[in-house]
């Protein structure tokens, strides 16, 4: 196996994850099998208990691992299906080391950062290597910036690992910032020089430097960076701001032939140039669509772009499939409570209510669901959004006054949404929800079954503690609510829908975690198709 390590310097949010994912895309299109992972230096065991304001969305993998949102980019940009082995945090490392010490596995030795902590990090690399013998290249992104105290042990572990597996099998890529100083009218290379100098102090000489820049990288600056950072000039690569979509990033990096630089360094130069026609076709559909729809996303973390990252990307995927630009209107659920749905949401072609926790903005989301149902606007509820639709229908159609979820009102007279039986008595919050891929049965003759096509069972990723109360399923169905899917083993409600409506679907799972650029999730595809039809009817 060959190894690529992607580090970052100067500032955070440079796009290391997108750079790493884009390299994965290019290598896959050269015919190589890639696998990606993220090493995060923070002390949380995983991001599952973090606020979206701290960390953006929590991305859930098939095996139930709650991970960094960059793993979402990895799965969308490549064909790899990741597992909990592909996201390592300092919390996991130290937890393992301490447990080994308590069990006496270190045979009485003094436990130290080096070698015991660094060995733990390297052991993950070796384990992933052993478990994936068919992978050609393992790409690992290191979170944070070089020089951060919390990341030093990861950098040292990578230095040691490169020596162990042989430097010919390793490519170090460093992502830095080239700021443009308006007052001087110049691009400054000094931050890049200082960042690389810090990395070299730690024992790592980057093979390739990716320069994040607003403008292009001229030859003078490329030459200067090469000289002061001890790399060849051709290995200084520009990573420019893309104009329309993040899916342009692989095409942008391809301009400087980064994939060629990588395969030459790793001795894989025999592979053909990447065949990017399918990727270019998708990008062109995103940039130059024929149609347009407007979809309101009503949530509680709406001001934060990364809180619903996978949902926004899934809407882009589905839009491209239908040659349609999806114009997203971000709606704060609490604003609906204060001013009403019509005033806040207005005329849109679809309404999406995403997942979330806590009671803030709940009544606003319920109002949004009613607004969509009453006005025949396509509605898509995800996780909490499905529960919201159920509560609204129970209250206003089934006559269950005061219906609610016990998450928001423990004394509700009609707990149509309740805590899952297996969740009762659980007090730890980390990794204790219903998590990961679960099998569900699709019922024939439903909208959901039509969208999924010729299958009667599906596997979707979950992240929730509450469910539709089985005691109310018959009353809801008698009132006209259609249950179109239930879990194969527990019989939990997975998908609800309404007949005689353009599109009114709620999913208890998170379909956004399985949508890809050229393979949009069928529920998102159906939702955008319904929104497109709504827009056409409005314009007729």
Image: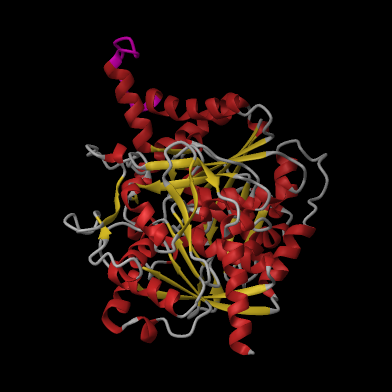
The residue located at (66%, 64%) in the rendering is: 248
Query: Considering depth in this image, is 70 or 406 the residue closer to the camera?
Result: 406
416 left or right of 9? left
Task: Depth check: give the residue in front, 23 or 479.
Answer: 479
Q: Quarter holding the N terminus?
A: top right
Residue in front for this viewpoint, 180 or 432: 432
Q: Which residues are drawn in magenta?
A: 103-114
On screen, residue 462 versus residue 413, left or right, reads right
Against 161, is 231 above or below? Answer: below
Give the residue drawn at x 57%, y 24%: 164
x, y percentage for residue 415?
A: 26, 55
Residue 154, percent from left and from top: 44, 37
Residue 214's spot in the image, x, y percent?
57, 71
Residue 96: in sight, yes or no?
yes
What is the quadrant of the C terminus in the image?
bottom right
Residue 110 in magenta?
yes
At horizontal 29% and vertical 39% (from top left) the residue drawn is 421
Name the dominant secondary structure of the magenta segment.
Answer: loop
Q: Does the rendering let one see residue 218?
A: no
Left or right, residue 64 beside residue 133: left
């Amino acid at each position: 196996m060959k190894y690529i390590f992607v580090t970052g310097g100067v500032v955070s949010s440079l796009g290391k994850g997108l750079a790493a994912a884009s390299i994965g895309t290019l290598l896959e299109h050269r015919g190589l099998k890639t696998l990606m992972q993220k090493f995060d230096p923070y002390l949380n065991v995983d991001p599952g208990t973090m606020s979206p304001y701290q960390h953006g969305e929590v991305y859930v993998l098939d095996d139930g691992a709650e991970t960094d949102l960059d793993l979402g980019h990895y799965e969308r940009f490549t064909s790899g299906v990741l597992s909990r082995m592909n996201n390592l945090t300092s919390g996991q490392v130290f937890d393992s080391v301490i447990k080994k010490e308590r069990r006496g596995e270190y045979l009485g030795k003094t436990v130290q950062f080096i070698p015991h902590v660094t060995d733990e990090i390297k052991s993950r690399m070796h384990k992933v290597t052993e478990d994936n013998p068919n992978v050609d290249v393992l790409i690992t992104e290191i979170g944070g910036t070089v020089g951060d105290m919390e990341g030093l042990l990861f950098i040292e572990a990578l230095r040691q690992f490169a020596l162990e597996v042989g430097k010919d099998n390793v490519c170090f890529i460093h992502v830095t910032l080239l700021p443009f100083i308006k007052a001087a009218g110049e691009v400054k290379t000094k931050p890049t020089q200082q960042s690389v100098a810090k990395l070299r102090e730690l024992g790592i000489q980057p093979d390739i430097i990716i320069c994040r820049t607003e403008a292009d990288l001229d030859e003078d600056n490329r030459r200067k960076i090469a000289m002061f950072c001890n790399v060849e000039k051709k290995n200084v690569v520009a990573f420019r701001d893309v104009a329309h979509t993040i899916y342009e990033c692989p095409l942008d990096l391809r301009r400087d032939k980064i994939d060629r630089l990588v395969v030459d360094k790793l001795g894989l130069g025999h592979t053909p140039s990447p065949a990017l026609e399918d990727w270019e076709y998708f990008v062109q559909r995103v940039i130059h669509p024929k149609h347009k729809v407007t979809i309101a996303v009503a949530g509680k973390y709406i001001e934060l772009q990364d809180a619903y990252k996978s949902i926004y990307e899934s809407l882009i995927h589905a839009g491209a499939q239908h040659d349609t630009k999806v114009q997203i209107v971000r709606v704060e659920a609490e604003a609906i409570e204060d001013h009403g749905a019509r005033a806040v949401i207005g005329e849109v072609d679809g309404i999406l209510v995403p997942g979330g926790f806590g009671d803030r903005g709940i009544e606003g989301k319920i109002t949004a669901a009613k607004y969509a149902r009453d006005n025949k606007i396509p509605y898509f509820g995800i996780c909490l959004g499905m529960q919201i639709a159920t509560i609204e229908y129970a209250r206003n159609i089934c006559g269950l006054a005061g219906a609610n979820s016990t998450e928001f009102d423990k004394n509700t007279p009609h707990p149509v949404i309740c805590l899952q039986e297996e969740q009762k008595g659980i007090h730890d919050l980390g990794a204790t929800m219903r998590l990961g891929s679960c099998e569900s049965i699709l019922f024939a003759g439903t909208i959901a079954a039509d969208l999924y096509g010729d299958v009667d069972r599906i596997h979707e990723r979950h992240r929730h503690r509450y469910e539709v109360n089985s005691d109310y399923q018959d009353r809801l169905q008698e009132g006209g609510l259609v249950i179109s899917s239930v879990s194969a083993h527990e019989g939990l409600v997975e998908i609800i829908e309404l007949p005689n409506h353009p599109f009114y679907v709620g999913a208890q799972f998170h379909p956004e975690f399985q949508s890809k650029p050229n393979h949009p999730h069928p529920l998102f595809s159906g939702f955008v198709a319904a929104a497109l039809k709504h827009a056409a009817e409005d314009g007729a």
